[in-house]
Image: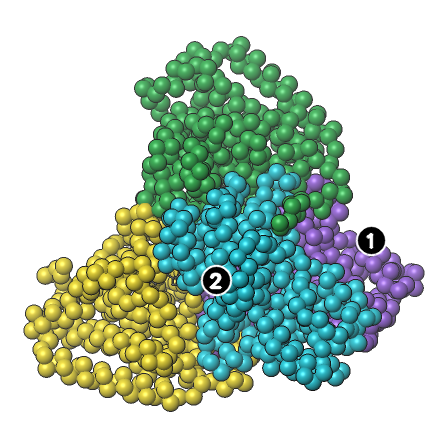
Chain colours: A green, B yellow, C purple, D cyan
Amino acid sequence: MVNQNYALENDKDTLLAMYREMLLARRIDERMWLLNRSGSIPFVVSCQGQEVMQIAASFALNKERDYVLPYYRDLGVVIHFGMTTREIFLQAYAKGEDPNSGGRQMPSHFSQKKNRIVTGSSPVTTQVPHAAGFALAAKMENNPAVSFVTLGEGSSNQGDFHEGLNFAGVHKLPVIFMVENNKYAISVPLNKQVACENISDRAIGYGIKGIKVDGNEAIEVYEAVKEAHERALNGEGATLIEAVSYRLTPHSSDDDDMTYRTKDEVTNEKSKDGLERFKNFLFEKGYLTETINDDLESEIKKEINDATEYAEDAPYADVSTINNYVYGEKGDH
Amino acid sequence: MVNQNYALENDKDTLLAMYREMLLARRIDERMWLLNRSGSIPFVVSCQGQEVMQIAASFALNKERDYVLPYYRDLGVVIHFGMTTREIFLQAYAKGEDPNSGGRQMPSHFSQKKNRIVTGSSPVTTQVPHAAGFALAAKMENNPAVSFVTLGEGSSNQGDFHEGLNFAGVHKLPVIFMVENNKYAISVPLNKQVACENISDRAIGYGIKGIKVDGNEAIEVYEAVKEAHERALNGEGATLIEAVSYRLTPHSSDDDDMTYRTKDEVTNEKSKDGLERFKNFLFEKGYLTETINDDLESEIKKEINDATEYAEDAPYADVSTINNYVYGEKGDH
Amino acid sequence: MAVLTYIQAVNQALKEEMEQNEKVFVLGEDVGKRGGVFLATSGLYDQFGEKRVIDTPLAESAIAGVGIGAAMYGMRPVAEMQFADFIMPAVNQIISEAARIRYRSNNDWNCPITIRAPYGGGVHGALYHSQSIEAIFANQPGLKIVMPSSPYDVKGLLKAAIRDDDPVLFLEHKRAYRLLKEEVPEEDYTVPIGKANTVREGDDVTVITYGLCVHFTKQAAEKLEQEGINTEILDLRTVYPLDQQTIIDAASKTGKVLLVTEDNKEGSIIGEVSAIISEHCLFDLDAPIHRLAGPEVPAMPYAPPLEKEFMINAEKIEQAIRDLAEF
Amino acid sequence: MAVLTYIQAVNQALKEEMEQNEKVFVLGEDVGKRGGVFLATSGLYDQFGEKRVIDTPLAESAIAGVGIGAAMYGMRPVAEMQFADFIMPAVNQIISEAARIRYRSNNDWNCPITIRAPYGGGVHGALYHSQSIEAIFANQPGLKIVMPSSPYDVKGLLKAAIRDDDPVLFLEHKRAYRLLKEEVPEEDYTVPIGKANTVREGDDVTVITYGLCVHFTKQAAEKLEQEGINTEILDLRTVYPLDQQTIIDAASKTGKVLLVTEDNKEGSIIGEVSAIISEHCLFDLDAPIHRLAGPEVPAMPYAPPLEKEFMINAEKIEQAIRDLAEF
Ligand SMILES: Cc1ncc(C[n+]2csc(CCOP(=O)(O)OP(=O)(O)O)c2C)c(N)n1
Ligand SMILES: Cc1ncc(C[n+]2csc(CCOP(=O)(O)OP(=O)(O)O)c2C)c(N)n1
Ligand SMILES: [Mg+2]
Ligand SMILES: [Mg+2]
């Protein structure tokens, strides 16, 4: 629940900026599904249910300095770090101009060096040691940057999670690990993935700080990340944050979640949707009104329409480019 | 410290049997170093400083049923589970008759199916998921067997540790993981391996029981393993035990430990040697006398002399056998 | 006989082996209620229960490693890697452990595990859901690698793999899952591991290949027959260790050899096939040994035109056979 | 010029690169105070401190993965795998990540990491301290694999690897560490990655090999010269991707080709060398392409007679060259 002492709570502009990004992420995601179901794009993997924690966390970072290593659901993180709506649709359509991979990778394999969004792959959890590596490098160079890496709770059972967090613990690295616990790894429910009560308790085994937050509560997430960020910059080392919410969509456009969970369960979880909750909170605070909200919605709709059109019309990379960039031009010296 | 209520404490026969095995392990190990330094065998990796925890733990297991997955220092475990002194020297000399590998593996890569000593390799920690696999199979077959696996504290930082313990936690498997914390991974001291206070605290992240014991205190180790064994058989799942002692020798016969630790440190730790402590305890209890001890020593010496001689004279496997046993004779059906 | 797809043949083989031998069980990600993301294990959870159809945590090294432990105990685990691309975290368990257990224990222990994994491209899978991974493992004595090309072979080879006393990597082409259908006997049968299969006789050009490329080669051969070019097709079936004698015979027969793989060329298993031929029947050759393979890039891109450019297809094979025939 | 051993050349290259570029740092198990179990990093801890000579926890996937992260950031990490055999837990990081970062990001990111690992047998290392592991990685575009055969090459190639903008797997033969000595220039120089090296001219038989086998081949060639058999020796130096043109030229020159590796034969990288030759210069050959390699067993045993049986040596090579010369 929102703690009345949080400073952010009274910062109307920031709260509205957060809301805008959350809403944008949700609306982009919804459009992706429409495009997928109508046959325009072959694949979608969603952020729905996790936008709130993603945006809230991102706002607690320094977007001019920090490095982010997002996983495939982190549309919110990359929006905040500067990827444009057009660029997001370009990657969904796999067009040559896509800054993430030039259409080489599947959608949601984010990358954009100029915004310090680090390229990711499909095998889960490999980004966790990378994040430790960025933090190690920043520390070696006295660069006051933090690395922020996310993963699903299912992915926290990979060996790379253990090895990456332990390395960060031993070397007291400025890195924030955020587990987005949406209670499923595809069809496997939480209790078949782990037997522990809290993923965040794993922090103790690495000698780092661990904290669990309600991922549907923007301000709670923001404060946890903010504190972790300060600790990182103060040389106090890494933090493991577990943010709990729920995956509101099927795993991806290839999945049928009704084979392993019930409609009732999903409906019930939908009623806790953090985006709705945040919106209501803004209404209660008087920061958001129907008019502001409607304007926002139509502005976003326009932005998405434009981006969709642009991406749809953009060309694929030429087939002759298939052999490019296996190695750099400069070989050895 | 020894708790006065432990039943084992008054079981003279068992205590003396434990002592005999500990002493045998120590004396075999010492002989190995002599043979190495005189050029008779190319390699030794020691159990010295860890015999007490190994033997004490093994006594708490069921040696007719349980499966053990020892690591390279676990001479004590394999002695208890039935490997003879001759067989131990046969593997040190890499002779054809060696039951562990027929001279194929380096010394201390233990294996003997008839005694349920599971074959191990050099890459550390791979045995941890195997132990979970044995426990899973035993559970599936309603076989009241427990699997017992050991590893060094350095090895507890491998991904396989995390994945194996998590699997055992989720499936509530009858397995005991014992970390033999001897404070070094070759030259790397504990504080450069982990930042946590206790390796045993990692148990919480897997929803299993964790316990830390003084590895130089035989009865403390015995009781912890005994309890873990009961829990396993009762369907209460896995236990992680951290047993702390010290590596009294260099890492192996190829190592020079004076490049990274001091003589003083080693001398100081030697004064806490669990074997000496256990011996004194038996003297105090009146179970051991100088006469009994001397008899034991000379009996063991004879056994070791015989084994050394036997192994030295035994033939190597014929070179023509190099191609044997890559695959089984029966292929597909 | 019922007509089964390639994936149905996988499913049927698993079901029958589990019925016949209660030591057989499956483990992997989403293999339970979900029946696997490709439905390979569909229905097994309901029939055999969660004790024999085990949804594992998301951790491939444990899937392999726990399976290896159970196999050493005496069970017959069938481990699923959700995509072959995700077998990489399990390489240590497969190479250092499964492949070496019998040899290192001097035949005392063995490890009868089957590891299934869907490989291959042409499914909009991009870099990490399209790879051919066989070459990574095709240098490890102790391991067998099977790559079936048809529903009939799938059923017979998967049964043989499960009954094999040594570890078998069983690679299924995911594009073949629903593309390939044929009549598959209801009764129990196995197809021998370690033997290549002549799927077509011909005396102009020999094509040696495996997996989905066998299908494309058959299409090409049928077309070329109308031009009077007769193609011999050898399906390797087991790509490691290779069936050397059958390869040598097939190459010698026509003297013109085309090797085809969907993998990128350098270091792929058809290099070994080529080496075997030039070691044993160089002087029977009437043309250089030609290799048709993917480009030398890490894996195939997602964008449809680029994916198509990467993939082998019947047209590319047809052209290569024609070139050789005319050599 | 000072005479350096192979391992001293490793050490000198590291030291000089660290002096010249403060982005260069090393990480691995026991690389700090201990200076590495083979003393490759001896003295570096004292000279550069624990921030640039990092003792890591015992976790190879993290050693590679943390290094990859730092490399993407812009550093020049040199990661040590204590033995090549223990690179297996890091395969996912090396293949799925390091090798694909440039391609998958369309040239936006790159990954200039060097991963050093001692490989090879003949040191009483048994199954897990003796392996040749290059074949596992020699099918991954984006990656380079360098295997030097002499102290001079070690220094020049390791410097080139560290300065390379892409990931390089740098495999050092551990038996060569103290066995091989030669004069090595004090000054800065590099040896180009991607180019094979003709280490001996001859016109009777061409031997193509790499690593420690180059040394054995030179010994064999010297002996055979007295019998009037002249051996051309090509040292591959970079085993992936291969220097095709130099291989083709060397094979064509004598028409009789012997390929040598310490690895077991099937699936080893000399299979690819053979395939390149029979693709491009089959009709220049006067004899079948012969391969000399280890037996098809998982890795070499510990017992001395069996280890010796496995290992390549000058006598085995000499005999194989003579057989080819007389063909
Ligand atoms: C190493 C690896 N194994 C398997 C997969 C296939 N896979 C993709 S997502 C996923 C589930 C991930 O679950 P979780 O980490 O909880 O993230 P979520 O999708 O729930 O956000 C799986 C098994 C993969 N991508 N990588
Ligand atoms: C995967 C792997 N990496 C590296 C090694 C080399 N190595 C052998 S023992 C050892 C240290 C092990 O330390 P610890 O686990 O604490 O066991 P201890 O030797 O102290 O009993 C290392 C690094 C190995 N055997 N396996
Ligand atoms: Mg999840
Ligand atoms: Mg230790």
Question: In which chain is the residue bearing label 2?
Answer: D
Asked whether D189 or B94 is in front, the reply is D189
Which residue is under mark 1?
A: C315
Asked whether A158 or C140 is in front, the reply is C140
- Distance in Å between CA atoms under marks 2 and 1: 55 Å
- Residue B70 horizontal side relative to residue B269, left or right: right
- Residue B247 horizontal side relative to residue C81, left or right: left
Whether the residue under disc 1 has CB within 8 Å of ligand 1: no
Which residue is located at x 31 percent, y 66 percent? B250
- Residue A142 horizontal side relative to residue B270, left or right: right
Name the residue type under label 2: Gln
- Look at discs 2 and 1 and give the one toward the viewer: 2
Looking at the rendered structure, the number of numbered marks drawn on it comes to 2
Residue A248: percent from left, percent from top: 51, 33
Residue A310: percent from left, percent from top: 70, 26
Placement of the C terminus of chain B among the 4 image quadrants: bottom right
Which residue is under mark 2?
A: D8
Which residue is located at x 55 percent, y 50 percent? D162
Q: Hey, which quadrant is residue A119 in on the image?
A: top right
Question: In which chain is the residue bearing label 1?
Answer: C
